[in-house]
Image (spheres, helix red, strand yellow):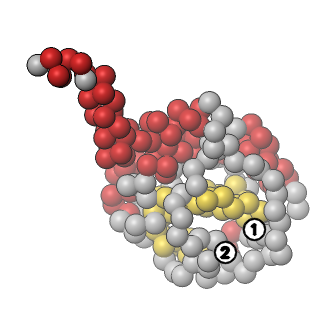
Amino acid sequence: MKLIKRNSINILFFMLLLTIIFVPDAKAFLLRGLMTIGFYTPDPVQTVSSASDLDGIKFKDIKGKLVDLGDLKGKVIFLNFWATWCPPCRAEMPSLHKLFTQFKNDKNVVFIFVDADGDLKKSAKFITDRQYELPVYAFASEIPKQVFESALPTTVIFDRQGRLSFRHEGMANYNDQKFVDFINKLKNTK
């Protein structure tokens, strides 16, 4: 008993560490706290490439409706690749939700949140359970490696001309005024 009392702080620290390691929501909570204090802020520097051929890059929603990126030319396209089991993906979801709510009624900006696991029912339930309004999609075609290779989360933004304007692998706080201004700049640039 004396051994337990003397080592209670160590035991509590070890239990906390195990919780963070093995419970995705606990790790996401910790990462979200780091984002709140300024870590993981994306640098919204426009890195414009030549116009990409987005035709044939397709995604489908829970109802089976297909979206072809080639049909979205003239709009800013915000793609986020994520998975329900991914703690960094979970950590950035609140900031993505806030960004989405700012632009959800803007017809010049399209958001596509792609479940990298392909289990659309599980992803839709995850989004609904957390009361997010994010439009969830799954892959419906091959995706070029310059858009998405394998790192989760990955965020990609195409400007109105179909040029790759932003690509970020890893979590980030997208509920940042600089990032909102960046999307508005893309939206207003022809």
Q: Residues within 10 Å of mark 2 (few under 14, many from 20)?
A: few
Labels 2 & 1 near each other (Cβ < 8 A)? yes
Image coordinates of residue 49 in percent, x first then y, are: 82, 71
What residue is at 84 percent from the left and 50 percent from the top?
A: 185
Residue 76: give x, y in percent of width and height: 73, 59
Residue at image coords 25%, 23% = 7
Q: Residue at x 69, y 62 (%)?
A: 167
To which quarter of the image does residue 23 belong?
top left
Instruction: Say whether residue 95 is left or right of residue 5.
Output: right
Q: Is residue 99 visible?
A: no
Report which residue position mark 2 lands on: 146
Circle 1 crowding by C-alpha within 10 Å: few under 14, some 14–19, many from 20: many
CA separation, marks 2 and 1?
A: 9 Å
Look at mark 1 in the image and give the residue it sits on.
164
Q: Which mark is residue 45?
A: none
What amino acid is labelled 2 in the image? Answer: Gln
